[in-house]
Amino acid sequence: MVLENDVEGIAKLADIHIQKEELAEFTSQFNHILEYFDILDTVNEGEEGEADLVNVLREDEVTPSLTQEAACANAHETEDGFIRAPRVM
């Protein structure tokens, strides 16, 4: 169970300012969240078994591609056989 001083400590660690009037509400919300985690802890995970996954991707095949000259043919600017582009940063 989370207490108001726990919420104050968490807020301090997170560098969040919480008003005194909000402490009760946040404490209640924390406790509800932890109750949901308790419910999730009761779920039995082991009965479903593993899914039968099959790789549906094809094998890579090496195919002929452009030559360096053909790749650079339509570039606005090249340098030493490479495409030159403006700096991004």
Image (cartoon, grey):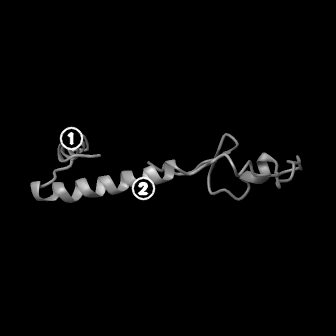
Q: At x 20% / y 49%, what residue is drawn? A: 16
Q: Position of residue 35 (x, y in %)?
A: 38, 53
Which residue is under mark 2? 36
> How many tags in the picture?
2
Q: Residues within 10 Å of mark 2 (few under 14, many from 20)?
A: few
Q: Nearer the viewer, residue 64 or 40?
A: 40
Q: Amino acid at mark 1?
A: Gly
Mark 1 surroundings within 10 Å by alpha-carbon count, few (fewer than 14), some (14 through 19), many (20 or more): few
**Residue closer to the observer: 34 or 66:** 34
Q: Amino acid at mark 2?
A: Tyr
In this rendering, would 14 be left or right of 75? Answer: left
Compared across the picture, whether 44 is left or right of 6 comes to right
Residue in view at x 62 percent, y 57 percent: 76
Residue sitting at x 66%, y 46%: 46
Could you give the CA–CA distance between mark 2 and mark 1, rounded to whole angstroms? 22 Å
What residue is rendered at 10% in x and 54% in y? Answer: 20
Residue corresponding to mark 1: 9
Query: Where's residue 62, x and y in %?
Result: 88, 46
The tag earlier along the polypeptide, 2 or 1, is: 1
Residue nearer the viewer, 2 or 82: 2
